[in-house]
Image (cartoon, rainbow, N blue to C red):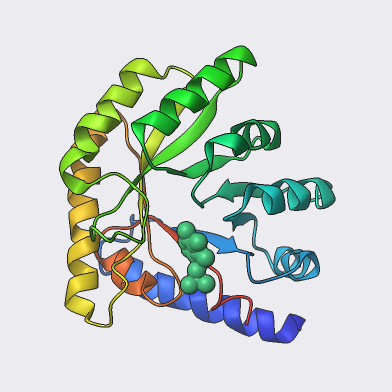
Amino acid sequence: MKEQFRKNLDEVIWNIEQARITITEHHIVKLVAVGKYSDEQSIKTLYELGQRAFGENQVQQLQTRMQNLEELPLEWHMMGHLQSNKINKLIEARPTLFQSLDSLKLAEALNTKLLEKTQKMSCLLQINAANESTKSGVSSEEAFDIYQRIQESCPQLKLKGVMSIGAHVTDEKIIQKSFEATHKIYDALKKEGASICSMGMSSDYELAIKCGSNLVRIGSKLFK
Ligand SMILES: *Cc1c(COP(=O)(O)O)cnc(C)c1O
């Protein structure tokens, strides 16, 4: 398993490198390994190969893995839709970054609970740039305003930027459009302090980076 993972990781890192230098040499891209199709031993193996940032899309799994792998110096990202009855669990887990803040309502509920516990949380606003009914996230049109409103009304949330999932189609042009739409919003939000543009998964991370992504979330390409 370790040799296969080494090959996967080398390939992904190489591809990220090729894509990022098309922007500039200074365009740094963070790799978050998504472990949802995988087990704790696999995460440990990837850690031994040098990977430090990991992500999950279910709070329960996130919490369990954070606890079981506590002795490793890892950072943990949550990147799935959060039901409001799971807010307390997420706060308990204390992830490094909550990437899927997908509505003003969730932001306000999360803020209230964080205030009770005098805790803060770093978050990304999820944008549904491809306008797909199967995906959560705020629309491209509303994203800028909602971002500002969260900053004004949710002091316990530290907004760091935006996250988006590429359009779920085979036509690369349409996927590119969805990434470009997200990146445009990210650009506008830089003056509001945004520094993270999270776009790109196993099937589309090189394209996402060429569109300006500086954080990719990769599962199947690493853990196969
Ligand atoms: C599963 C998941 C990923 C990784 O998907 P792969 O296609 O396996 O790379 C990235 N982001 C989110 C939000 C996910 O749920």
| Screen quadrant of the C terminus | bottom right
Horizontal and vertical percent position of residue 49: 70, 69
Please tell me which residue lies in front, 189 or 172. 172
State the residue at coordinates (17%, 49%): 184
| Screen quadrant of the N terminus | bottom right
User: In the rendered image of this protein, does residue 35 appear above or below residue 149?
Assistant: below
User: In the rendered image of this protein, does residue 116 appear above or below residue 70?
Assistant: above
Judge whether residue 21 can be spotted in this image: no
Judge whether residue 171 can be spotted in this image: yes
Q: Give the quadrant of residue 47.
A: bottom right
State the residue at coordinates (26%, 31%): 146
Apparent side of residue 74 relative to residue 100 in the rendered image (left or right): right
Horizontal and vertical percent position of residue 194: 32, 36
Horizontal and vertical percent position of residue 182: 24, 53
Please tell me which residue lies in front, 28 or 222. 222
State the residue at coordinates (57%, 21%): 114
Apparent side of residue 159 relative to residue 178 in the rendered image (left or right): right
Q: Give the quadrant of residue 191.
A: top left
